[in-house]
Image (cartoon, rainbow, N blue to C red):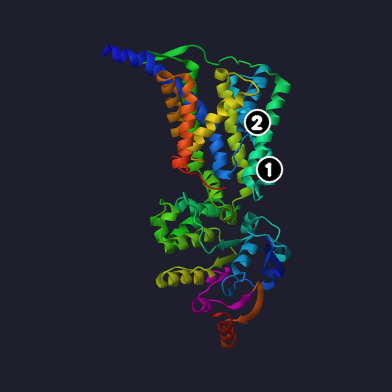
Amino acid sequence: MLEIRNLQTHYGHSHIIQGIDLSVGAGEVFGIFGRNGVGKTTLLKTIAGWVKPTDGVITFDGHRIDSQAAHRIAQHGIGFVPEDRRIFPGLSVEENLTLGYLQAPGRSRADNRAALAKVYERFPRLAERRRQFGTTLSGGEQQMLAMARVMIGEPKLLLIDEPSEGLAPMIVADLYAIITSLREAGCTILLVEQNLGEALKFCDRFIAMERGCVVLSGNAASQADRDALIARVAV
Amino acid sequence: MSEAVQYFQFVLAPQMLIGLVLGVAVILVALGLTIIFGLLDVINMSHGEFYALGAFFALALAQIGLPFWLLLLLVPLLMLPVGYIVERALIQRVFHSGDRHVRTLLLTFGLGLVMEDSYRLVFGPNPYRPETPITGGVEIFDIFLPSYRLFLIIVGAAIIAAVAFIVYRTRLGAMVRAAAFDRDMAASLGVPVQHVYAGAFAFGVALAGLAGVLLAPIYSVFPTMGRDFILMAFTVVIVGGMGSIAGVVVAGLLLSQIQAIVALYISPVWSDPVVFGIMVVMLMVRPQGLFGRLGHG
């Protein structure tokens, strides 16, 4: 589903992603782990089109997307929930959500409304607060809103960056319940997470990154691979 | 008591009405400016020349026999592609550079000079006074007001309401605001950000053009007409809050009333210095203006 070959990304003169190869199959939950500053977030941003790679190829569902604009990448079915949630100030919860319709431009109005109703059913707190500005929600609710507005476009691949950061354990559990349900619905997930213990419960496969390169790849079901990951990444 | 009423009726109220008409005119010019600034973070120094372009379009089209009422619709429609092309062909080219503010400011300043000289070459330096489409006057509470100025106040209010509705109450407006606040996140939700930017610039330019059509019968049409309003429009945008529609309306009405009152009680010579002084004080004590910004480009 997602194929990455020799990906290179620079920020000015800094070489952040230094030749990554990755292959993610449909329906997988794929973990990307590593210490701070190794390029995990930049990798997701490059896939989402926020940062243009300086070399390499990214294909998704047979489409080459590395040179496409971010909105086109979204319309191919790649949703991105960034680390800092990026809720739009000055937009209500419902406005934040309905912007997500544009990820699926060919969908009918009725289907859009049905997608909104489904999201409200899954996140009743957002339905209660639909008229409120998104930035007035609590941290956990904002994370839910960030997830929900991407889910409204029914993405095939979801990129999630540090979803549990700064959230209470109960909310983290809710969040992972949502990720599980997305996985059961057939959504492919690329997950960047510092909380290894929690994330490994949901991953099928994973990689560990150091200095912009993949230094370890493994299967989450294998205890040996998990031990190797923890030895490499855990601080 | 009756002296006070007479003073209000014959001195103060007419002066305030003049201020109100000027305020609506300035708001119409400043609306497009504030949308472009709030969304794109671009200080459009050629905005006055786009206002003049609208007036010259109207002048040229009126000469081939098109009625004023049709021009109110046609000129903004003509201005839309002009603004769209200017944004995509010129502004986008320097938009992503590190010193965006300086480059876009100089670019639009240069564009304004080219446009102004072009008007002089094509239409000559002399002013044209288009026919007033509505003649006569009305008396409101015994105060005489030319009918066209009343029409301008009503249409101006309708335009302001329509713009506020589009920006704050429609999905299109939500797209524009989202792209203003966070272009990357908006793009990842499928918003075609570059087209939204170009569209918003075109919308601002079309509003300037519409202001040109509406104000031409009052203030005449000449190559440097953009300069007359642009300083006041910039002042209104800065005092109201760069990018705020409510700010433009409140600051436009407030500052034009202050101008009118200063002209009455001190001297017309002092009306501009007082207003620009308010702008300077505002920049010193509350640089975000009365209402803050729409976004940050």
Residue B202 shown in magenta: no
Who's the residue at 66% across and 24% down the image? B57
Q: Quadrant of residue B144?
A: top left
Q: Is residue B204 left or right of residue B152?
A: right
Residue A189 shown in magenta: yes
Q: Is residue B184 above or below residue B285?
A: below
As rendered, which of B197 and B97 lies closer to the eye?
B97
Q: Kindly report which numbered mark, 1 or 2, lies closer to the viewer in this rendering.
A: 1
| Disc 2 target residue | B78
Q: Is residue A137 left or right of residue A2?
A: left
As rendered, which of B191 and B205 lies closer to the eye?
B205
Q: Position of residue A115 (x, y in %)?
A: 50, 57
Q: Position of residue A88 (x, y in %)?
A: 50, 53
For the N terminus of chain A, the image quarter is bottom right
Q: Is residue A30 left or right of residue A120?
A: right
Who's the residue at 53% across and 50% down the image? B181
Callout 1: SS: helix
Marking on residue B88 = 1
Of mark 1 and mark 2, the one earlier in the sequence is 2
Pointer 2 chain: B
Q: Position of residue B261 (x, y in %)?
A: 41, 22
**Three-letter code for the amino acid on which mark 1 is drawn:** Arg
**Three-letter code for the amino acid on which mark 2 is drawn:** Leu
Q: Which residues are magenta?
A: A183-210
